Amino acid sequence: MKIKTLTLTVITLSLLGLIGYRIISNKAEAAKNDKKGDKKPPVMVDAIIVAEKDFANAISLSGAIEANENVEIRSEVSGIVEKIYFTEGTNVSKGQVLVKVNDIELRAQLSQAVTKQNLAAENERRAKLLLQKEAISQEEYDIASAEYRSLKAQTQLIQAQIAKTAIKAPFSGKIGLRNISPGTYVTPTTLITKLVSANQVKISFSIPEKYASEVENNSPIQFTIPNNPQKFTAKIYAIEPEIETTTRTLKIRAIADNPNGKLLAGTFANIELPLKNIKGAISIPSEAVVPVQDGKVVYIANNGKAKEIKIETIARTDKDVIVTQGIKSGDTLLTSGVMSLKDEADIKVKVK
Protein backbone atom coordinates (compact mmCIF):
# COMPACT_ATOMS: atom_id res chain seq x y z
CA MET A 1 0.00 0.00 0.00
CA LYS A 2 2.79 2.38 0.91
CA ILE A 3 4.68 1.39 -2.21
CA LYS A 4 1.63 2.13 -4.39
CA THR A 5 1.13 5.52 -2.76
CA LEU A 6 4.80 6.35 -3.14
CA THR A 7 4.69 5.37 -6.82
CA LEU A 8 1.67 7.63 -7.52
CA THR A 9 3.39 10.50 -5.73
CA VAL A 10 6.52 10.11 -7.81
CA ILE A 11 4.52 9.97 -11.06
CA THR A 12 2.51 13.09 -10.09
CA LEU A 13 5.63 15.03 -9.20
CA SER A 14 7.26 14.00 -12.45
CA LEU A 15 4.28 15.22 -14.51
CA LEU A 16 4.17 18.51 -12.66
CA GLY A 17 7.88 18.98 -13.21
CA LEU A 18 7.53 18.25 -16.92
CA ILE A 19 4.67 20.71 -17.27
CA GLY A 20 6.59 23.40 -15.42
CA TYR A 21 9.63 22.81 -17.61
CA ARG A 22 7.57 23.19 -20.78
CA ILE A 23 5.97 26.40 -19.52
CA ILE A 24 9.32 27.92 -18.67
CA SER A 25 10.79 26.79 -21.99
CA ASN A 26 7.88 28.25 -23.97
CA LYS A 27 8.15 31.57 -22.17
CA ALA A 28 11.87 31.72 -22.80
CA GLU A 29 11.37 30.90 -26.48
CA ALA A 30 8.58 33.48 -26.81
CA ALA A 31 10.74 36.12 -25.15
CA LYS A 32 13.54 35.24 -27.51
CA ASN A 33 11.26 35.53 -30.52
CA ASP A 34 9.85 38.82 -29.24
CA LYS A 35 13.33 40.17 -28.87
CA LYS A 36 14.11 39.18 -32.43
CA GLY A 37 10.84 40.77 -33.62
CA ASP A 38 11.56 44.12 -32.01
CA LYS A 39 13.64 45.14 -34.97
CA LYS A 40 11.20 45.19 -37.93
CA PRO A 41 12.52 46.04 -41.38
CA PRO A 42 11.80 49.59 -42.57
CA VAL A 43 8.63 50.17 -44.62
CA MET A 44 9.16 51.04 -48.30
CA VAL A 45 7.23 54.23 -49.13
CA ASP A 46 6.97 56.70 -52.00
CA ALA A 47 7.28 60.41 -51.32
CA ILE A 48 7.27 63.83 -52.95
CA ILE A 49 8.94 67.10 -52.03
CA VAL A 50 6.31 69.66 -51.06
CA ALA A 51 6.41 72.88 -53.08
CA GLU A 52 4.34 76.08 -53.14
CA LYS A 53 2.41 77.19 -56.23
CA ASP A 54 -0.45 79.51 -57.12
CA PHE A 55 -3.84 77.77 -57.04
CA ALA A 56 -6.93 78.82 -59.00
CA ASN A 57 -9.55 78.15 -56.37
CA ALA A 58 -13.11 77.19 -57.36
CA ILE A 59 -16.09 75.42 -55.82
CA SER A 60 -18.76 73.23 -57.36
CA LEU A 61 -22.39 74.06 -56.64
CA SER A 62 -25.89 73.06 -57.62
CA GLY A 63 -28.35 75.55 -59.02
CA ALA A 64 -31.45 75.94 -61.14
CA ILE A 65 -32.16 77.60 -64.46
CA GLU A 66 -34.99 80.12 -64.46
CA ALA A 67 -36.63 82.11 -67.22
CA ASN A 68 -35.31 85.64 -67.51
CA GLU A 69 -38.92 86.83 -67.77
CA ASN A 70 -41.97 84.66 -67.10
CA VAL A 71 -45.58 85.85 -67.02
CA GLU A 72 -49.06 84.37 -66.94
CA ILE A 73 -51.27 85.84 -69.64
CA ARG A 74 -54.72 86.80 -68.31
CA SER A 75 -57.46 89.16 -69.45
CA GLU A 76 -58.04 92.38 -67.52
CA VAL A 77 -61.68 92.45 -68.62
CA SER A 78 -64.40 89.80 -68.66
CA GLY A 79 -65.93 88.70 -71.93
CA ILE A 80 -66.18 86.15 -74.75
CA VAL A 81 -62.96 85.28 -76.60
CA GLU A 82 -63.49 86.42 -80.17
CA LYS A 83 -60.16 85.49 -81.74
CA ILE A 84 -56.86 83.78 -80.78
CA TYR A 85 -53.86 85.14 -82.71
CA PHE A 86 -51.02 82.93 -81.46
CA THR A 87 -49.83 79.38 -82.08
CA GLU A 88 -48.77 77.34 -79.07
CA GLY A 89 -45.03 76.94 -78.57
CA THR A 90 -44.01 79.67 -81.02
CA ASN A 91 -42.12 82.92 -80.59
CA VAL A 92 -44.07 86.18 -80.33
CA SER A 93 -42.97 89.81 -80.37
CA LYS A 94 -43.50 92.49 -77.75
CA GLY A 95 -46.83 94.26 -78.35
CA GLN A 96 -48.21 91.48 -80.56
CA VAL A 97 -51.95 90.86 -80.06
CA LEU A 98 -52.46 87.38 -78.63
CA VAL A 99 -56.19 87.28 -77.87
CA LYS A 100 -59.17 89.51 -78.72
CA VAL A 101 -62.13 89.66 -76.35
CA ASN A 102 -65.51 90.72 -77.79
CA ASP A 103 -66.00 94.47 -77.20
CA ILE A 104 -69.31 95.19 -78.92
CA GLU A 105 -71.03 96.35 -75.71
CA LEU A 106 -68.12 98.58 -74.78
CA ARG A 107 -68.15 100.20 -78.22
CA ALA A 108 -71.87 100.94 -77.86
CA GLN A 109 -71.15 102.52 -74.48
CA LEU A 110 -68.33 104.51 -76.06
CA SER A 111 -70.61 105.84 -78.80
CA GLN A 112 -73.12 107.00 -76.21
CA ALA A 113 -70.43 108.56 -74.06
CA VAL A 114 -68.92 110.44 -77.04
CA THR A 115 -72.33 111.90 -77.91
CA LYS A 116 -72.81 113.13 -74.34
CA GLN A 117 -69.27 114.49 -74.28
CA ASN A 118 -69.78 116.45 -77.49
CA LEU A 119 -73.00 117.97 -76.13
CA ALA A 120 -71.29 118.88 -72.86
CA ALA A 121 -68.39 120.43 -74.80
CA GLU A 122 -70.81 122.65 -76.71
CA ASN A 123 -72.61 123.65 -73.49
CA GLU A 124 -69.26 124.50 -71.87
CA ARG A 125 -68.32 126.65 -74.89
CA ARG A 126 -71.59 128.57 -74.75
CA ALA A 127 -71.36 129.05 -71.01
CA LYS A 128 -67.90 130.52 -71.42
CA LEU A 129 -69.17 133.08 -73.92
CA LEU A 130 -72.06 134.01 -71.65
CA LEU A 131 -69.68 134.35 -68.71
CA GLN A 132 -67.53 136.76 -70.70
CA LYS A 133 -70.67 138.86 -71.36
CA GLU A 134 -71.58 138.50 -67.67
CA ALA A 135 -74.87 136.89 -68.72
CA ILE A 136 -74.32 134.00 -66.29
CA SER A 137 -72.54 133.63 -62.99
CA GLN A 138 -69.16 131.96 -62.46
CA GLU A 139 -70.91 129.14 -60.61
CA GLU A 140 -73.10 128.30 -63.59
CA TYR A 141 -70.06 128.18 -65.85
CA ASP A 142 -68.21 125.94 -63.39
CA ILE A 143 -71.12 123.49 -63.41
CA ALA A 144 -71.07 123.28 -67.22
CA SER A 145 -67.29 122.87 -67.26
CA ALA A 146 -67.38 120.12 -64.61
CA GLU A 147 -70.04 118.25 -66.59
CA TYR A 148 -67.86 118.33 -69.69
CA ARG A 149 -64.75 117.14 -67.86
CA SER A 150 -66.72 114.30 -66.21
CA LEU A 151 -68.12 113.03 -69.52
CA LYS A 152 -64.69 113.32 -71.14
CA ALA A 153 -63.17 111.17 -68.36
CA GLN A 154 -65.95 108.61 -68.79
CA THR A 155 -65.19 108.40 -72.53
CA GLN A 156 -61.48 107.85 -71.81
CA LEU A 157 -62.35 105.12 -69.29
CA ILE A 158 -64.43 103.21 -71.84
CA GLN A 159 -61.66 103.61 -74.43
CA ALA A 160 -59.20 102.12 -71.93
CA GLN A 161 -61.54 99.19 -71.34
CA ILE A 162 -61.79 98.58 -75.09
CA ALA A 163 -57.98 98.67 -75.38
CA LYS A 164 -57.77 95.94 -72.72
CA THR A 165 -59.90 93.60 -74.86
CA ALA A 166 -56.86 93.23 -77.13
CA ILE A 167 -54.46 91.16 -74.95
CA LYS A 168 -50.88 91.84 -76.06
CA ALA A 169 -47.50 90.24 -75.33
CA PRO A 170 -45.68 92.34 -72.68
CA PHE A 171 -42.29 91.23 -74.04
CA SER A 172 -40.83 89.07 -76.79
CA GLY A 173 -40.57 85.37 -75.99
CA LYS A 174 -41.99 81.91 -76.47
CA ILE A 175 -45.69 81.39 -75.86
CA GLY A 176 -46.86 78.34 -73.95
CA LEU A 177 -49.84 76.04 -74.27
CA ARG A 178 -53.23 77.75 -74.35
CA ASN A 179 -55.99 76.92 -71.88
CA ILE A 180 -58.87 78.52 -73.79
CA SER A 181 -60.68 78.27 -77.11
CA PRO A 182 -62.58 80.81 -79.20
CA GLY A 183 -65.92 81.40 -77.50
CA THR A 184 -64.57 80.86 -73.98
CA TYR A 185 -65.84 83.36 -71.41
CA VAL A 186 -62.75 84.72 -69.68
CA THR A 187 -62.37 86.74 -66.51
CA PRO A 188 -59.29 88.25 -64.84
CA THR A 189 -58.84 84.93 -62.97
CA THR A 190 -58.73 82.82 -66.17
CA LEU A 191 -55.23 81.63 -67.11
CA ILE A 192 -54.98 81.93 -70.89
CA THR A 193 -51.36 80.85 -71.39
CA LYS A 194 -47.81 81.60 -70.26
CA LEU A 195 -45.11 83.67 -71.92
CA VAL A 196 -41.43 82.98 -71.29
CA SER A 197 -38.45 85.05 -72.43
CA ALA A 198 -36.18 82.58 -74.24
CA ASN A 199 -33.19 84.66 -75.38
CA GLN A 200 -31.62 84.75 -71.91
CA VAL A 201 -31.97 82.64 -68.75
CA LYS A 202 -31.17 83.20 -65.09
CA ILE A 203 -29.11 80.76 -63.01
CA SER A 204 -29.92 80.88 -59.31
CA PHE A 205 -27.67 79.25 -56.70
CA SER A 206 -26.45 79.69 -53.12
CA ILE A 207 -22.94 79.64 -51.67
CA PRO A 208 -21.74 79.02 -48.07
CA GLU A 209 -21.34 82.24 -46.13
CA LYS A 210 -17.56 81.77 -45.77
CA TYR A 211 -17.19 82.48 -49.50
CA ALA A 212 -19.46 85.56 -49.49
CA SER A 213 -16.60 88.07 -49.58
CA GLU A 214 -15.02 86.39 -52.62
CA VAL A 215 -17.95 86.84 -55.02
CA GLU A 216 -18.51 90.00 -57.04
CA ASN A 217 -20.93 91.23 -59.68
CA ASN A 218 -19.91 90.67 -63.32
CA SER A 219 -17.81 87.64 -62.34
CA PRO A 220 -18.05 84.82 -64.91
CA ILE A 221 -19.17 81.30 -64.04
CA GLN A 222 -19.42 78.07 -66.00
CA PHE A 223 -22.17 75.49 -65.75
CA THR A 224 -23.44 72.31 -67.35
CA ILE A 225 -26.87 70.72 -67.58
CA PRO A 226 -27.83 67.01 -67.39
CA ASN A 227 -27.21 64.88 -70.49
CA ASN A 228 -25.29 67.65 -72.22
CA PRO A 229 -21.46 67.76 -72.17
CA GLN A 230 -21.37 71.38 -73.36
CA LYS A 231 -20.11 74.00 -70.92
CA PHE A 232 -22.14 77.19 -70.79
CA THR A 233 -20.96 80.58 -69.54
CA ALA A 234 -22.92 83.06 -67.43
CA LYS A 235 -22.20 86.32 -65.63
CA ILE A 236 -23.19 87.16 -62.05
CA TYR A 237 -25.49 90.19 -62.05
CA ALA A 238 -27.20 90.16 -58.63
CA ILE A 239 -26.19 89.16 -55.09
CA GLU A 240 -28.62 89.00 -52.18
CA PRO A 241 -27.72 91.73 -49.64
CA GLU A 242 -27.98 89.41 -46.63
CA ILE A 243 -27.15 85.85 -45.53
CA GLU A 244 -30.03 83.40 -45.23
CA THR A 245 -30.02 82.71 -41.48
CA THR A 246 -31.54 79.22 -41.62
CA THR A 247 -29.07 77.82 -44.16
CA ARG A 248 -26.14 80.22 -43.63
CA THR A 249 -25.89 80.72 -47.37
CA LEU A 250 -25.87 83.66 -49.76
CA LYS A 251 -28.18 83.62 -52.80
CA ILE A 252 -26.71 84.67 -56.14
CA ARG A 253 -28.08 85.06 -59.66
CA ALA A 254 -26.26 84.98 -62.97
CA ILE A 255 -27.54 85.51 -66.50
CA ALA A 256 -26.64 83.55 -69.64
CA ASP A 257 -27.42 83.95 -73.31
CA ASN A 258 -29.65 81.26 -74.78
CA PRO A 259 -29.70 81.88 -78.54
CA ASN A 260 -30.47 78.27 -79.47
CA GLY A 261 -33.05 77.68 -76.76
CA LYS A 262 -31.15 74.69 -75.29
CA LEU A 263 -31.46 76.01 -71.74
CA LEU A 264 -34.96 75.38 -70.43
CA ALA A 265 -36.40 76.98 -67.31
CA GLY A 266 -36.55 74.53 -64.42
CA THR A 267 -33.46 72.58 -65.51
CA PHE A 268 -30.89 71.52 -62.89
CA ALA A 269 -27.44 73.16 -63.32
CA ASN A 270 -23.97 72.07 -62.14
CA ILE A 271 -22.04 75.28 -61.48
CA GLU A 272 -18.30 75.89 -61.28
CA LEU A 273 -17.76 79.12 -59.34
CA PRO A 274 -14.22 80.61 -59.46
CA LEU A 275 -12.97 82.20 -56.25
CA LYS A 276 -9.91 84.32 -55.48
CA ASN A 277 -6.62 82.69 -56.48
CA ILE A 278 -4.49 81.42 -53.58
CA LYS A 279 -0.89 82.64 -53.77
CA GLY A 280 1.80 80.22 -52.54
CA ALA A 281 -0.65 77.39 -51.93
CA ILE A 282 0.52 73.90 -50.99
CA SER A 283 -1.18 71.25 -53.08
CA ILE A 284 -0.73 67.59 -52.12
CA PRO A 285 -2.16 64.33 -53.52
CA SER A 286 -5.40 63.33 -51.84
CA GLU A 287 -4.09 59.78 -51.27
CA ALA A 288 -1.49 61.21 -48.86
CA VAL A 289 -4.21 62.42 -46.49
CA VAL A 290 -5.39 60.14 -43.68
CA PRO A 291 -8.75 61.00 -42.10
CA VAL A 292 -8.78 60.73 -38.30
CA GLN A 293 -11.42 61.32 -35.65
CA ASP A 294 -10.63 65.00 -35.12
CA GLY A 295 -9.47 65.99 -38.60
CA LYS A 296 -6.83 64.97 -41.14
CA VAL A 297 -3.16 63.97 -40.88
CA VAL A 298 -0.27 63.29 -43.24
CA TYR A 299 3.14 61.70 -42.75
CA ILE A 300 6.49 63.27 -43.61
CA ALA A 301 9.95 61.75 -43.57
CA ASN A 302 12.04 62.75 -40.56
CA ASN A 303 15.50 61.17 -40.16
CA GLY A 304 14.41 57.78 -41.52
CA LYS A 305 11.15 57.73 -39.57
CA ALA A 306 7.57 58.64 -40.36
CA LYS A 307 6.32 61.73 -38.55
CA GLU A 308 2.57 62.30 -38.19
CA ILE A 309 1.45 65.88 -38.91
CA LYS A 310 -2.06 67.25 -38.46
CA ILE A 311 -3.15 69.51 -41.33
CA GLU A 312 -5.85 72.08 -42.17
CA THR A 313 -7.29 72.19 -45.69
CA ILE A 314 -9.29 74.80 -47.61
CA ALA A 315 -10.21 73.21 -50.94
CA ARG A 316 -10.14 69.96 -52.85
CA THR A 317 -9.88 69.05 -56.52
CA ASP A 318 -10.33 65.70 -58.23
CA LYS A 319 -6.80 64.61 -57.29
CA ASP A 320 -5.33 67.15 -54.89
CA VAL A 321 -5.99 68.82 -51.54
CA ILE A 322 -5.00 72.41 -50.74
CA VAL A 323 -3.29 72.61 -47.33
CA THR A 324 -3.27 75.84 -45.32
CA GLN A 325 -1.57 74.65 -42.14
CA GLY A 326 0.64 71.77 -40.97
CA ILE A 327 3.25 71.23 -43.65
CA LYS A 328 5.55 73.61 -45.50
CA SER A 329 7.51 73.86 -48.69
CA GLY A 330 10.50 71.48 -48.70
CA ASP A 331 8.93 68.77 -46.51
CA THR A 332 9.20 65.19 -47.79
CA LEU A 333 5.59 64.02 -47.92
CA LEU A 334 4.86 60.29 -47.87
CA THR A 335 2.31 59.31 -50.51
CA SER A 336 2.05 55.51 -50.37
CA GLY A 337 1.25 53.05 -47.59
CA VAL A 338 0.14 55.89 -45.31
CA MET A 339 -2.96 54.07 -44.06
CA SER A 340 -0.79 51.45 -42.34
CA LEU A 341 1.92 53.82 -41.06
CA LYS A 342 2.36 54.83 -37.45
CA ASP A 343 4.20 57.75 -35.93
CA GLU A 344 7.95 57.09 -35.60
CA ALA A 345 7.77 53.99 -37.84
CA ASP A 346 11.04 53.14 -39.65
CA ILE A 347 10.75 53.92 -43.37
CA LYS A 348 12.79 53.73 -46.55
CA VAL A 349 11.82 56.58 -48.83
CA LYS A 350 11.69 56.64 -52.62
CA VAL A 351 11.24 60.23 -53.80
CA LYS A 352 9.32 60.62 -57.04
Image: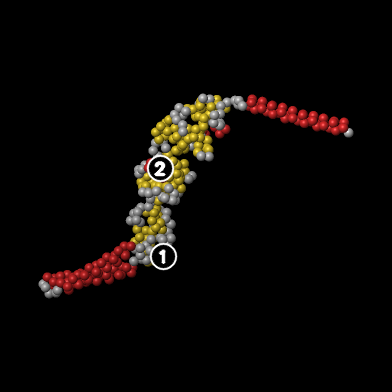
Question: In the depicted view, which residue is nearer to us: 224 or 341?
Answer: 341
Residue found at x 28% / y 68%: 110
Q: Callout 2: helix, strand or loop?
A: helix
* Left or right of 49, for residue 12: right
* Residue 158 location (% of width, % of height): 29, 66
Task: Tell me the residue that label 1 is attached to.
Answer: 184
Residue found at x 66% / y 27%: 31
Residue extending farthest to the front is 2
Question: In the depicted view, which residue is nearer to us: 157 or 278?
Answer: 278
Determine whether 294 is above or below 121 in the image.
above
Residue found at x 87% / y 32%: 2
Q: Callout 1: helix, strand or loop?
A: loop
Q: Earlier in the sequence, mark 1 or mark 2?
A: 1
Question: In the depicted view, which residue is nearer to us: 275 or 89?
Answer: 275
Residue extending farthest to the right is 1
* Residue 221 location (% of width, % of height): 40, 42
Disc 1 residue crowd, few under 14, some 14–19, many 20+, Cα 10 Å: some
Task: Tell me the residue that label 2 is attached to.
Answer: 211
Residue extending farthest to the left is 133
Residue found at x 54% / y 31%: 343
What's under tag 2, amino acid-wise?
Tyr
- Residue 219 visible in the displayed image: yes
Residue extending farthest to the bottom is 135
Quadrant of the frame with the N terminus: top right
Q: CA distance from mark 1 to mark 2?
A: 53 Å
